[in-house]
Image: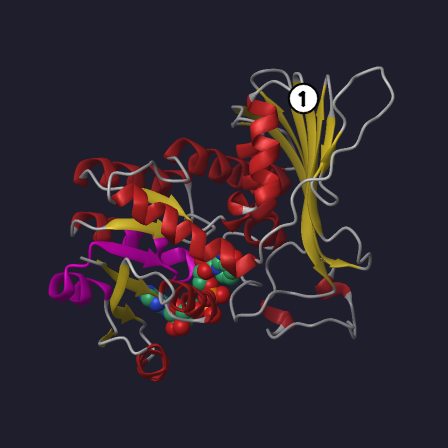
Amino acid sequence: MPVRTAVIGVGIMGNVHLDQLAKIPEIVVEAVVDPSEETGKKTVEKHRVPKWFPDTGVMLAEVRPEYVVVASPMPYHAADAIAAFDAGAHVLIEKPLCTSMEEAEAIRAAALRAGRLFTMGFQMRQFSANRTLRQHVEEGRMGTIYHSRVWGGHVMNYPWGRYFHRKSVSLGGVVANTTVHPLDALLWIIGSPEPVAISASSFCKLVRMPDPPINFSGTIDEVSVEDFAHAHVRFADGSSMSIEGNWLMHATDRIMGFEIHGTLATAQSVAPQWQPEHGKEVETVDLEKDIAWHEGTRQEHEEFIRAIRGEGTPMVTFHQALTVQKILCGLYESAAQDREIRL
Ligand SMILES: NC(=O)c1ccc[n+]([C@@H]2O[C@H](COP(=O)([O-])OP(=O)(O)OC[C@H]3O[C@@H](n4cnc5c(N)ncnc54)[C@H](O)[C@@H]3O)[C@@H](O)[C@H]2O)c1
């Protein structure tokens, strides 16, 4: 029997999920939720989904889905996910997870209470180069990881959607919404070290630009998030990480990526390769060509469905999701308070 599924929030990302879910024979989408009647009706017609609901609670009570994809705006993630767990569903939540560490803990408690599985929409974990790098690290082939760098942004472009520029509905700007992808992948690859402190600074350059040559669909007066941020993270094992996000960059050759420094090797995600022998002639190893971004979404569903059927474990653990959330919340707190924050 296919897994009976519902998607909450059917804007741009909800539609990406619906496109990919339709390619998986083990899944049948039975309902979507969106408060916008126009969006809901358009979506059920386009994706041939039986039912649209304007309200999550009503959908859960009536449809009782086994699997729920939460792709609503970030402030609703926690309430939607907790309601779905309480109704007995397994849940995938889009990034960023939620508004605070308290909400993150409440999501975890609801999943444990219900005995249901959790994962997140972090497609970069599906990239074959990232999986190979993770294996190298796990096998000790990079030695001890002592530092890593991650960066992610856009070339003069705020993301689409009407909320990414408003802190109240998006947690933050470039780091919470764009850099979060390579940040999660990097933390996962290096074995999820425990962050203990973070020091960050952030800027909002857009509001100071009189006529910005930028792709932006919001209202400048509403902009309340950073379009550039930098942070230094210290981990319990003594290693460190540098995080940089920039939506208003001009360089086109370093949009998103990371670098890992180990005692035996250095790995770069941009042109994935690694250098195996410390002190000898450098040998570079090119990793497998990678999958498309949306294919990662399909694969994350396939992997989660296998876990739901008891044939594996979910891709993202609560510990990993909460580590990313802790770093994001700490970064914004540090930048706002102009000091290092203990995590
Ligand atoms: N993993 C990725 O690559 C990726 C990419 C883009 C967005 N996202 C994430 O997906 C989520 C949605 O982003 P988007 O770009 O699709 O936004 P969007 O603005 O395109 O769509 C959001 C939809 O949610 C609906 N909505 C509003 N309030 C709701 C509620 N209370 N319950 C249910 N639906 C509600 C809106 O009407 C809209 O149709 C965000 O968390 C975002 O960060 C992830």
Mark 1 residue's CB less than 8 Å from ligand 1: no
Q: Is residue 300 above or below residue 132?
A: below
User: Is residue 225 highlighted in magenta?
Assistant: no
Most foreground residue, 18 or 232: 18
- Residue sitting at 59 percent across and 39 percent down? 130
Q: Quadrant of residue 239?
A: top right
Residue extent of the magenta highlight: 56-81
Residue 169 visible? The answer is no
Task: State the residue lying farthest toward the left.
Answer: 62
User: Is residue 63 highlighted in magenta?
Assistant: yes
Quarter of the N terminus within the rendering: bottom left
Horizontally, residue 125 falls left or right of residue 149, namely left
Q: Position of residue 335 (x, y in %)?
A: 63, 41
- Residue sitting at 47 percent across and 50 percent down? 96
Residue to which mark 1 is pinned: 142
- Residue sitting at 50 percent across and 53 percent down? 296
Number of marks drawn = 1
Q: Quadrant of residue 307?
A: top left
Horizontally, residue 303 falls left or right of residue 174, namely left
Most foreground residue, 58 or 21: 21
Q: Secondary structure at mark 1?
A: loop
- Residue sitting at 79 percent across and 16 percent down? 278
